[in-house]
Amino acid sequence: MTRATRDDGTVRYSARAEVSWRVAEQAVWYRGVLRGFVETMGPAAPGTITVDRDTVSVEDGRAGAGRWRHLEVRAVQAASRSLQLSLPGDRLVQLRFLGDSPRRWEILMRRLISDAYEGAGRGRVVEFQPRITTG
C-alpha cells in the first residue's frame, strides 16, 4: 500500500504487463472425480493494470479490457511470474509484469479487496482462491 498511497491519501498504482485472457478451459478428472480445471490462455498483448481505492482496470486495446470494482473480483492468484484475476462474466485475465512484482500486486490486490469487503459490511476475507470467501 505504501507505493500505491499518495501524499493526499488517495490510492493509485499502475504497471505495464503482458495481458492474456482465458480462451478455453478443460476439466481435470481423476478416478471419476472432478479435480479442477486447466485454463488455456490466449495470446499476450502489451497492456496496463491500474488500481485505485475502489477499482481495478486492465487495458490492452482489446474488447475484454475494462474496469471492475474490487467487490466484483472473484479470485486472486499469483504465480512466480504472473497474477491471475477472476472477473465477472466468468472471465480470467493473466498479467505478466514488465518491471514489477506479481507478489507485490498480489499483496496490493488482497489489501484493496479486503478493505472493500469490510467497508461494504461483507465480512473479513479469509481466502482469495479458488474464489474469494469471507469468514
Image (cartoon, rainbow, N blue to C red):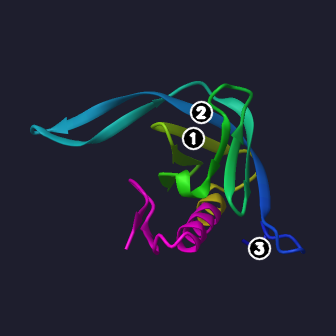
- Residue, x 62% and y 30% (percent of image)? 64
- Image quarter of residue 24: top left
| Residue 20 numbered mark, or none | 2
Q: Earlier in the sequence, mark 3 or mark 2?
A: 3
For residue 11, above or below residue 72: below
- Image quarter of residue 17: top right
10 Å neighbourhood of mark 1: few (<14), some, or many (≥20)?
Answer: many
Q: Which residue is mark 3?
A: 2
Closest to the observer, 55 or 127 = 55
Q: Amino acid at mark 2?
A: Ser
- Residue, x 50% and y 36% (percent of image)? 91
Local secondary structure at mark 2: strand
For residue 124, above or below residue 116: below
Local secondary structure at mark 3: loop
Q: Which residue is mark 1?
A: 94
- Image quarter of residue 113: bottom right
Q: Is residue 89 left or right of residue 96?
A: left
10 Å neighbourhood of mark 3: few (<14), some, or many (≥20)?
Answer: few
- Residue, x 58% and y 47% (percent of image)? 82
Image coordinates for residue 44, horizontal then vertical, percent? 64, 29
